[in-house]
Image: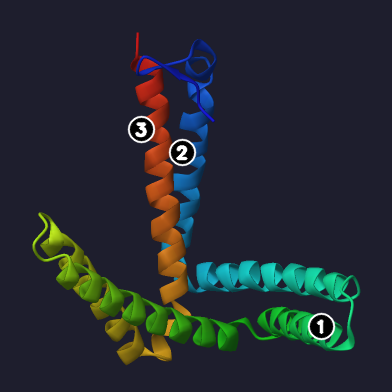
């Protein structure tokens, strides 16, 4: 956690400003590379999800043998096996896995958007409720647009999300590093 005194960064944080700038530049470069080849970025993101699923599945399997009772062992072991199989599938066929993940993303965005609209409308008398509704509408529309372009867009949607995230994180780190350095 960054140390801040009276709204000012600590001297130890201030002395590390170059690390934030360096990380920001590195993330920006990675984001531009991802933006330049969205298919490769999509495959990389699928591999990342696959690796997490494999790791999670192995943990489920280890946990399965730590619980008592046959019905509990069966549940945890089955969950672990399904996660491991999904992780392996992501590595064997990343293009098909990207199609499944893109469809899941579209459905998740649509549900989250509708939920935000619902919450925003319930907050109607409060100031700022319209921003929540607008956010929900935009999120839901993003889900619909992704779903309408599916499965063709599954070759680039995940890569685009990864590229945009890397670029935003890069700019954030760069701006933070420069900001910490300039505080006197």
First in sequence, mark 2 or 3: give its number: 2
Query: Which tag is nearer the camera, tag 3 or tag 1?
Result: 1
Which quadrant is the N terminus positioned in?
A: top right
Label drawn at residue 24: 2
Do the residues bearing badges 2 and 3 touch, measured as CB atoms within 8 Å?
Answer: yes
Crowd class of label 2 (few under 14; some 14 to 19; many from 20; radius 10 Å) = many
Q: Could you say where residue 159 lies in the image, as x and y percent from the top left?
A: 46, 69
Give me the C-alpha separation between circle 3 and circle 1.
Answer: 49 Å
Q: Could you say where residue 28 lies in the image, as x and y percent from the top left?
A: 44, 46
Give me the C-alpha separation between circle 1 and circle 2.
Answer: 46 Å
Between 93 and 169, the residue placed more toward the observer is 169
Q: Secondary structure at mark 2?
A: helix
Between 74 and 52, the residue placed more toward the observer is 74
Which quadrant is the C terminus positioned in?
A: top left
Q: Name the residue tied to disc 3.
A: 175
Do the residues bearing badges 1 and 2 touch, measured as CB atoms within 8 Å?
Answer: no
Q: How is the image coloured?
A: rainbow
Do the residues bearing badges 3 and 1 touch, measured as CB atoms within 8 Å?
Answer: no
Q: Name the residue tied to disc 1.
A: 72
Label drawn at residue 149: none
Res. 154 image quadrant? bottom left
């Amino acid at each position: 956690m960054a140390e801040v005194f009276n709204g000012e960064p600590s001297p130890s944080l201030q002395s590390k400003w170059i690390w934030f700038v360096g990380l920001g530049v590195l993330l920006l470069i990675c984001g531009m590379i991802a933006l330049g080849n969205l298919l490769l970025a999509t495959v990389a993101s699928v591999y990342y999800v696959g690796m997490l699923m494999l790791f999670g599945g192995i943990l489920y399997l280890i946990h399965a043998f730590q619980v008592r009772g046959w019905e509990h062992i069966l549940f945890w072991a089955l969950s672990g096996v399904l996660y491991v199989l999904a992780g392996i599938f992501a590595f064997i066929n990343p293009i098909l896995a990207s199609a499944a993940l893109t469809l899941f993303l579209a459905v998740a965005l649509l549900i989250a958007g509708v939920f935000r609209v619902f919450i925003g409308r319930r907050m109607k008398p409060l100031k700022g409720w319209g921003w929540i509704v607008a956010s929900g509408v935009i999120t839901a529309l993003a889900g619909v647009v992704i779903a309408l372009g599916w499965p063709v867009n599954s070759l680039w949607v995940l890569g685009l999300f990864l590229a945009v995230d890397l670029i935003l994180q890069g700019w954030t780190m760069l701006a933070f590093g420069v900001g910490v350095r300039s505080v006197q």
